[in-house]
Every structure is written in structure tokens, then in C-alpha cells.
Image (cartoon, helix red, strand yellow):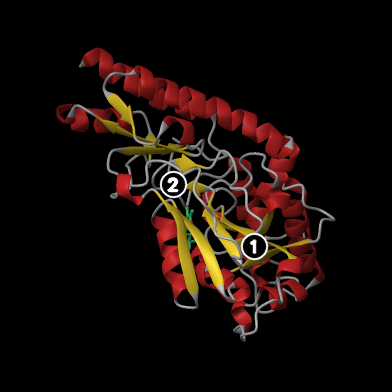
Amino acid sequence: MKKHNFSAGPCILPQEVMQKAAEAVVELDNSGLSLIEISHRSPAFIDIMERATSLALELLGLQDKGYKAMFLQGGASLQFIATAYNLLENKAGYCNTGTWSTKAIKEAKLLGDVVEVSSSKETNFNYIPKGYDIPKGLDYLHITTNNTIFGTQYKALPETDAVLVSDSSSDIFSRELDFSKFGILYAGAQKNMGPAGTTLVVVKEDVLGKVSHQIPSMLDYKIHADKESMFNTPPVFPVYTSMLNLEWLKNKGGVAAIEKENDAKAALMYGEIDRNPLFDGFAATEDRSTMNATFTLNTPELKDHFEAMAKEAGLNGINGHRSVGGYRASMYNALPIESVQVLVDVMKTLEQKA
Ligand SMILES: *Cc1c(COP(=O)(O)O)cnc(C)c1O
């Protein structure tokens, strides 16, 4: 039986996407060859890369706006240092909203002057800071639009005249935002786009080329952009599968349509967390993530019982990250609302039996 997969990443993908990806591993489009044995310079793969990058821009509403989309490697974690290499000349600002922001700050500090313009560390990152001052003259301001571990999400972007950079690994393609406000947007594939192994980097081309230091080739966005993500051998399977998933999303009606579904799932989930006296939400209500709902069970005696019931109902991946504890329901694009309903029903049954 297929499980209800709430895993935070790698995570659920549409069943039809996994089916098509599996078929392409055996044989790509009646070519007599597998996706993973053809040259990345073959017309077939060049076409796949082209479709993947143009779909990414189209779904973000960034076509013909001076942006380039690239499928790179090294995960979001490599982009922590890559963004700094490409943009940091004098001083960069970082909003510290969780584990991933903290890691991004650590990497950028290796290269230059970094100011933490805001932080919610003192309350274990349970909210998104607002109303702080952003110093003038920053090379860029870095945010994490969705904090996968703590379950918080920016609902409004900070107002800044600096280049806005975002790690959007866990909410890319999940909701509409004015993406033209970003100079660089990056996302590891395995949260909402595809299998692990590729990272989408979307760059406004005019933000590049402004630093005086040398950039190692593999970290240089200009090189990757000029080579159409083919400076070195791209991760063909994750790129292909991401392309299938972006096609799936486009056929569903794109980001606006999936946002409605994601809002409905989040409303169902948080509705139960707030209603059920046994559970408490972790994140500040106004900053709650539509992707990752974090919550705790306030009656520790029921822990084993709840977890056994969840297992019995086929729920997978609801344990919270160790830095928050409790539970985390990740509700990425491909998770059907029926799965959320199963989790909610388990929570209700637990309350009735308690
Ligand atoms: C998972 C995650 C990362 C790390 O991604 P890798 O691809 O494993 O490097 C970074 N940022 C956010 C917001 C994440 O959710």
C-alpha cells in the first residue's frame, strides 16, 4: 500500500512523475537508449535541459525579464558559498530565521563582511522577524523564504534596495510571489521539485559580474549561465525528473492553482492543531508555513499510542526535526489533501480515546 508521505525532503513527488521517470531510465522516448546512458550533449538531453529551464522561468513568471535558470549541483548548501562568491564585495546582510540561514551565514563569513540584520534565534526560530532596520549599501540581502525545520514562512518580502537573494528550497513553486523582486533564488530539488542531486538557481543576469575577486569556475554563475548548465556533466536524472514535475505542475494550472491546494491543506492541518487540545503549534500563527507544519503533543503519555496509530494509518515522515522535537507534517505540492485528512483523523481519534 502506498503510504501517506509527509517526509520533509527528499519528499513526495507525483506518482505519474515517478512512473515516467522510471520508464525513461529503461528507455527514453522510444530511442532505444536509457536517459542515463545518453550523452548530455545529445540533442535529446539538450532539449530536456532547455524545457526544464524554460518551464522553471515560466512557472515563476520570469520569462523575458532578464533571468537565467540553471540546474546545478552541490545542493542548496553549495549555493550558500556560491552566492557569496558571486555577489559579496563589501558587505552582505542576512536574516537569520533558522538552521539553514545560520549555515548560509557561516559560509558567507568565510569570504567577507556579513551583518545579521535580524534573527529569531532567541526563541528557537519560531517566528519571522519584522520591522528591523536594513543598513544601506549592502551588496545583497539574504533570506530563507521557508524554514523547513521550524515551519515558518515569509508572507511578505523585506523591502530593500539591495539585491534580494533567497534560499527557497522548501517553498519554490508552492505559491505566488513577485519573483522579479529577487536577484538570485535557489532551491535544492528534493523539497518540492524533484529528486536530490540538482539545485535550481535563478539569477537576474545584471546582478552578476560586479565583484573584483576571482570566482572558482564551478561556483561562477556566469560560467554556468553562459554554458546553459552544461559547463560540466549535469545530473541528468534529477534534471529530467524535475522537468517532468514542472510539466505536471504546469498542466495542473501552475503555481496559482497549486497555491490554492496548498492553502486548503494548510488550513485543514492547522485547523486541527488549533482545535485539538492535545496538540500545540510551534510557529507563530501569522508566520506559519504552508509547506511544513510543526507541532507538539502536550500529553507525553500518549506519544507511543499516537505514533502507533499514525504508523497503522500508513503515515510516513511526521517526526519533527531534533531541534524542534514533536512532529512535522510536510505538505509539498504532490501531497494530496486526502493524506492530510488521514493525519487529522488520527489526531481526532487520539483525542477521543484519551
Ligand atoms: C533542505 C534545505 C537545505 C539543504 O539543501 P541541500 O540540497 O541538502 O544542500 C537548504 N535550505 C533549506 C531551506 C532546506 O530546506
Relative to the observer, which residue lies in front, 193 or 217? Answer: 217
Residue located farthest toward the top when viewing the structure as drawn: 352
Q: Is residue 167 visible?
A: yes
What residue appears at the point 71 percent right and 72 percent down from the top-left corner? 208
Relative to the observer, which residue lies in front, 98 or 334? Answer: 98
Q: Is residue 222 above or below residue 15?
A: below
Q: Position of residue 35 (x, y in %)?
A: 67, 64
Relative to the observer, which residue lies in front, 335 or 114? Answer: 114
Q: Is residue 155 above or below residue 236?
A: above
Look at the numbered disc 2 and give the secondary structure of its residue. Answer: loop
Viewer-side label of 1, 2: 1
Label 2 within 8 A of ligand 1 by Cβ: yes
In this picture, residue 297 sits left or right of residue 96: left
What residue appears at the point 62 percent right and 48 percent down from the top-left corner? 159
Quarter of the image with the N terminus in it: top left
Quarter of the image with the C terminus in it: top left
Pointer 2 residue:
8
Residue type at numbered disc 1? Val
Residue located farthest toward the right when viewing the structure as drawn: 64
Residue located farthest toward the left when viewing the structure as drawn: 301
Which quadrant of the structure image shows residue 214? Answer: bottom right
Pointer 1 residue:
201
What residue appears at the point 19 percent right and 27 percent down from the top-left corner? 299
Relative to the observer, which residue lies in front, 250 or 101? Answer: 101
Q: Position of residue 278 (x, y in %)?
A: 26, 22
Residue type at numbered disc 2? Ala
- Distance Cα–Cα, label 1 vs label 2: 20 Å
Label 1 within 8 A of ligand 1 by Cβ: no
Labelled disc at residue 234: none
Task: Characterize the local packing of mark 1: few (<14), some (14-19) or many (20 or more) Cα atoms within 10 angstroms.
Answer: many
